[in-house]
Image: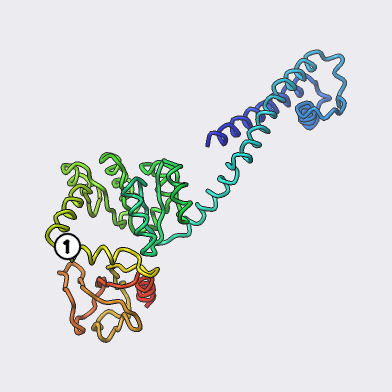
Amino acid sequence: MRSKNRLIKGLIFTSIVIAAGTTGYKLLGGPEWSLLDSIYMTIITLTTVGFGEIQDLSGNPYARILTIFIILFGMGSIVFVVSTVTGFIVEGELTNVFGRRKMLKEISALKNHFIVCGIGDIGSIVVKELIQSKRDFVVVDTDFKKLEKLSAVEKVLYINDDATNDETLTNAGIREAHGLITILPEDKDNLFVTLTAKQLNPNLRIVSKGVDENTIKKLKMAGADSVVMPDSIGGLRMVSELIRPAAVSFLDKMLRSQNGKTYRIEEITIPEGSKFIGQTLAEADLLTGTRVLIVAMKEKEGDIIYNPENTSIITGETVIVVLGESLEIKRVREWIEKQ
């Protein structure tokens, strides 16, 4: 980024020298100097190619003084630009620039993806889970080294910028995203990201980290659909290990990859206008040919029905909770959404 700024400054200074030299030759050369002559004289002087003067300057000392200044200042700016470009190539920054452009193009093509703001210890776990559950996502963080390290292990799309900026979230595809999770260290930053994200995409589902219990209400008022406090979750996990170790062991083994497969409890929403609306679960046969199991069903604004009967009726925006291998669940979800 620093080399890029140096390059921009060098190009700006070189442009100023060219513009000043052209203007100077035009004013000092008199009517016999055309604009093209002035530009040409400036460029050949600046590049020191050795061509002769296109107009005789022997009787025009001011034009010769201008030529001296163009050589002194112009050559300095050109050397500065060339050295910066060389540094760009040697340091690999030019490759990074093209890489970032390619990444932004890939991000712009995403639909219904997730955005992760913050890549600390919790963020790394979130990213790992999104990878294992075969979800499209974009990571946003200001720490370039952490992002590079993350991307070196898995191909991860990321934005190296401040998540509290509107432009950053826009570049991350906020308007086409399905959900956002903000895990920044400070509650005030998570609050700002939540408020900004909800304004850019009112339909976005937002999950925010909470540090202080008093900020939960504020985060929800700002637009967070859910607020998670890591310390509380850690306490519940510890007591669960104490009083229900078998259940915890089952969930732990399920969350870990087994023989290259990842098993998860997921939810699939039946979209409005689907051909399955009005059918029973038996008639719809949503999971035919798979090993995915329906463990619960939730109607819009309704209660959760655990282990639903085959005679349960599917309505608009019914949510079914399923258990199975992540890749199979993804295929089932995509198939249902197309019907």
Q: What residue occupies the far left of the structure in this picture?
A: 243
**Local secondary structure at mark 1:** helix
**Which of 183/191 is in front?**
183
Q: What residue occupies the far bottom of the structure in this picture?
A: 283
| Residue drawn where x is 63% and y is 41% of the image | 89
Against 261, is 187 above or below? above
Within 10 Å of disc 1 (Cα), the crowding (few <14, some 14-19, many 20+) is: few
| Residue drawn where x is 73% and y is 26% of the image | 22
**Residue 236 position in % (x across, y down):** 16, 54
**Which of 209/281 is in front?**
209
Against 83, is 258 above or below? below
Residue located beneath label 1 in the image:
245
Residue 291 shown left or right of residue 145 in the figure: left
| Residue drawn where x is 34% and y is 59% of the image | 129
Q: In the image, what residue type sits under mark 1?
A: Pro
**Which of 56/164 is in front?**
164
Quadrant in the picture for the C terminus: bottom left
